[in-house]
Amino acid sequence: MSNKLRNINKRAINQQMALPLIFKTIKNRENYLISECNQEAINLIENYSFWQNRKKTNSIPGAIIYGPKGSGKTHLSSILKKKIDCVYLTSLSNDCLEQVTEGKNFILDNFIPGKVYPSELVMHFMNQVTYKEGSILLLSRLSPFEMNWNLDDLNSRIRSLISSEIKLPDDVLLYSFIVKYSNEKNLFMSDKKLIYILERLDRSFESVIKVINRLDTFSLELNEKVTYKNIKKILDNLN
């Protein structure tokens, strides 16, 4: 996290401030915050005809959505899960192969090469899902071309999938997110304090999550409202 102040698009945020921002913790389409940085990904998720396409045995409806931690990939996948009934996995084991039945859909989160996703097992799993005419949504912080599975066939297979990047949020989306996340924590702050925080954060959802979590803990421990002094102390410690 940088000590340098960011230049905030305050005019755009002022327009956003005029809107009645009411957010719920339920993971549904209505409360997912949309901006240019994630519009392509939401369009992909909501293309239900793609996910349920069963024209060819060798043509698996599969895609990968990638972006930084805290960018909303898991939240986004929950929209798909509600629509087409997916099995959500954060790792693969031999037992997972038994879950592959006719037309079964899967979401694989934190999808990167390593112990939790062994290359040969991933290849076998994808072949099984393809044969059973299911679908797979992969969620990762890495793009398909940043992954190396040490299997040419698997690298080619994953890189051939439709992919969509969730980019770093713009100021309006980041402002909306900090309002949403702080409200979920019952940590209500003035617009001026929100801007004060945003000016001192990296442009990422992860930075917002870290600061709000620390402020929430700090506020509960001291049993007092958030002050500029407390905010500065939290930001200094994170930096």
Image (tube, helix red, strand yellow):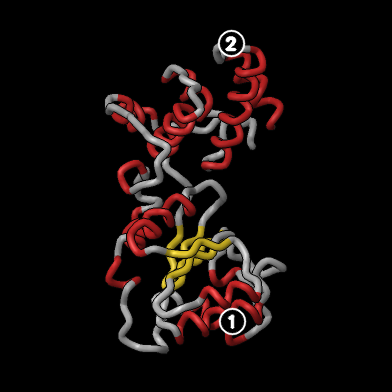
Q: Give the image quarter of residue 54.
A: bottom left
Rendered residue at 42%/77% (across/down): 134
57 sits left or right of 153 in the view:
left
Depth check: 72 or 95 in front?
Answer: 95
Q: Give the image quarter of residue 59.
A: bottom left
Residue 61 in percent (x, y) is at 39, 76
Residue 212 in view (yes/no): yes
Q: Quadrant of the N terminus?
A: top right
Residue 5 in percent (x, y) is at 56, 29
Rendered residue at 64%/30% (across/down): 3
Classify 86 as above or below 60: above
Q: Which residue is mark 1?
A: 123
Disc 2 to disc 1, C-alpha distance: 53 Å
Q: Give the image quarter of residue 11.
A: top left
Classify 89 as above or below 98: above
Rendered residue at 35%/88% (across/down): 56
231 sits left or right of 130 in the view:
right
Q: Residues within 10 Å of mark 2 (few under 14, many from 20)?
A: few
SS at mark 2 in the image = loop
Q: Amino acid at mark 1?
A: Met
Classify 66 as above or below 185: below
Q: Which residue is mark 2?
A: 224
Q: Kindly identify which numbered label has been placed on residue 237.
A: none
Residue 27 in percent (x, y) is at 40, 45
Disc nearer the start of the sequence (2/1)? 1
